[in-house]
Image (tube, grey):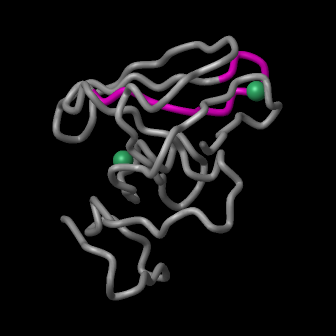
Amino acid sequence: MKEAQCSCGKLRALCEGEPAKVSICHCDACRRRTGSAFGIAAFYPRAAVRVEGERRAFTRDSDAGHAVTFHFCPDCGSTLYWEPSRKPDMIGVGIGAFADLDYPMPDQSVSDARRYGWIAFPDAMQRRE
Ligand SMILES: [Zn+2]
Ligand SMILES: [Zn+2]
């Protein structure tokens, strides 16, 4: 069991077992959501995630046009997890929220054509345009 939490700790996601997939995304919307150079999602089966605490939701379309609903803490504003309509059986959790140095390396880098030129990843990571 791994626990992810928002900045203030009031919103938490308890995740059972290993993530099905971990993806880095370089799209502009992920950058704007995080304020960082890219976003990282750990996808867990819905049944493996238990959420505790108040949250608010924001829905936007992905670059491919599929709605994604992001859930964030109303007090500190951190986005903790999200529901991609394209994968209704999965929940994405921001891996930074685990604050766990042993968390598995991402499997893939998506929207890789939008990656900042100064970011280099290990060769083992898959790239997707
Ligand atoms: Zn919070
Ligand atoms: Zn993205």
Identified at 26% across, 27% down, the residue is 89
**Horizontal relation, residue 38 to residue 78: left or right:** left
User: What residue is drawn where x is 41% and y is 42%?
Assistant: 29
Q: Position of residue 107 (x, y in %)?
A: 34, 66
Magenta stretch: give its range.
Answer: 73-84
Confirm whether the magenta stretch covers residue 113.
Answer: no
User: On the image, which quarter does residue 43 sit in?
Assistant: top left
Q: Quadrant of the N terminus?
A: top right
- Residue drawn at x 82%, y 31% as measured from the top left: 8
On screen, 56 above or below 38?
A: above
| Residue 91, horizontal then vertical, whole percent | 39, 32
Name the residue nearer the viewer: 129 or 52.
Answer: 52
Left or right: residue 104 compared with residue 51: left
- The residue lying at 68 percent from left, 59 percent from top is 100
Q: Observer-nearest residue: 128 or 12? A: 12
The image quadrant of residue 45 is top left
Image quadrant of ligand 1 equals top right
Q: Nearer the viewer, residue 5 or 14?
A: 14
Inspect this view and state whether residue 32 appears. yes
Point out residue 72 in the picture as x, y percentages from the top left corner: 60, 24
